């Protein structure tokens, strides 16, 4: 799967569609760069769509947590959408499933933002 | 990669890796090939691959401090019972007891420190000992699936859920 990050508007929410592996190196760097770009544009309601991300390592997890904290510090929210089974399991064993708001329906996820 | 040795039976593999990001992918790919050939199922291969990644990331980042002059030594042993992986760095070594528990409330939002936890969670056996280089040697193993009884797919955290509470103790 090609590593890619694109974003689109869904009302006041920015949906960030990622694909590929979020791992040490290019994957983590792309997520970091894109979230930084969104925050620079004052986009602080971010829904990260991970439907096409089938692999995340500890570096990728670190980047997710870093993004979550950065967005929160700006008064915004970073939520997750469409976790693949492996990513779901990874967030569960690391207890991060209790930290992130996770959705399986995009419309419901978009409506959940304050 | 600067050196590779495989025995005629291909049951013992030694590779010397450079301290660079690409070594993480290379180590994962090599171990995945061995794991697949040994008969591990898709989920177990994923766990082995992830553990190797985390072991080499640990050597690259924490052990060798990302210094290009240092090496990472990867050894894979395949016996009738299990696949054992050694990752040795050229750092100063560390004590497992000093590794913070990433599941502790105060560490949940930490941006690092989950690699050891994941290796423990995904492998059947895991330990860190002083390496021959003076650095740390990570030793981890996974029991081979029995003939006619392939490793389970579709189950999460095999061998790991029980390992998790030991983290940071």
Image (cartoon, rainbow, N blue to C red):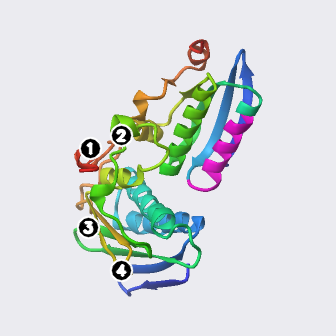
Q: Give me the C-alpha separation between circle 1 and circle 4.
A: 29 Å
Nearer to me, B82 or A22? A22
**Residue B161 got which mark?**
1
> Which residue appears at 65% of the width and 54% of the height?
A26
> Which residue appears at 46% of the width and 63% of the height?
B62
**Residue A93 got which mark?**
2
Look at the numbered disc 4 and give the secondary structure of its residue.
strand
| Image marks 3 and 1: residues in contact by CB distance under 8 Å | no
Q: Earlier in the sequence, mark 3 or mark 1?
A: 3
Mark 3, residues whose alpha carbon is within 10 Å: few (<14), some, or many (≥20)?
A: some
**Residue B82 got which mark?**
3
In terms of secondary structure, what is the magenta stretch mainly? helix
Mark 1, residues whose alpha carbon is within 10 Å: few (<14), some, or many (≥20)?
A: few
Q: Chain of mark 1?
A: B
| Image marks 1 and 4: residues in contact by CB distance under 8 Å | no
- Depicted B51 relative to depicted A79: above or below: below
A63 on left or right of B62: right
Q: Chain of mark 4?
A: B
Look at the numbered disc 1 and give the secondary structure of its residue.
loop
> Magenta includes A28?
yes
Q: Position of residue B154 (x, y in %)?
A: 35, 42
Q: Which residue is mark 4?
A: B12
Residue bounds of the magenta highlight: A24-38
For discs 1 and 4, the disc positioned in front in the rendered view: 1
Residue A81 sits in quarter: top right
Residue B133 sits in quarter: bottom left
């Amino acid at each position: 799967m090609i590593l890619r990050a694109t974003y689109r508007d869904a009302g006041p929410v920015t949906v960030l569609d990622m694909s590929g592996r979020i791992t040490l190196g290019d994957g983590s760097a792309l997520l970091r760069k894109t979230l930084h770009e969104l925050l620079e544009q004052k986009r602080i309601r971010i829904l990260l769509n991970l439907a096409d991300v089938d692999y995340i390592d500890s570096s990728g997890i670190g980047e997710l947590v870093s993004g979550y904290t950065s967005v929160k510090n700006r008064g915004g929210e970073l939520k997750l959408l469409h976790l693949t089974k492996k990513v779901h399991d990874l967030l569960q064993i690391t207890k991060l499933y209790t930290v992130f708001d996770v959705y399986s329906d995009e419309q419901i996820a978009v409506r959940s933002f304050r | 990669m600067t050196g590779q040795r495989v025995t005629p039976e291909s049951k013992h593999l030694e590779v010397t890796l450079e301290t660079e990001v690409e070594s993480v992918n290379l180590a994962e790919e090599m171990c995945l090939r061995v794991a697949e050939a040994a008969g591990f199922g898709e989920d177990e291969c994923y766990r082995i691959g992830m553990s190797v990644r985390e072991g080499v990331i640990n050597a690259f980042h924490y052990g060798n401090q990302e210094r290009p002059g240092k090496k990472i030594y990867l050894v894979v042993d395949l016996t009738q019972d299990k696949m054992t992986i050694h990752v040795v760095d050229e750092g100063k070594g560390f004590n497992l007891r000093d590794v913070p528990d990433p599941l502790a409330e105060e560490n949940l939002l930490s941006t690092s420190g989950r690699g050891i936890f994941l290796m423990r969670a995904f492998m059947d056996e895991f330990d860190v000992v002083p390496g021959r280089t003076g650095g740390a040697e990570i030793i981890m193993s996974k029991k081979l699936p029995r003939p006619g009884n392939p490793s389970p797919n579709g189950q999460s955290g095999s061998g790991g859920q029980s390992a998790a509470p030991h983290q940071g103790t």
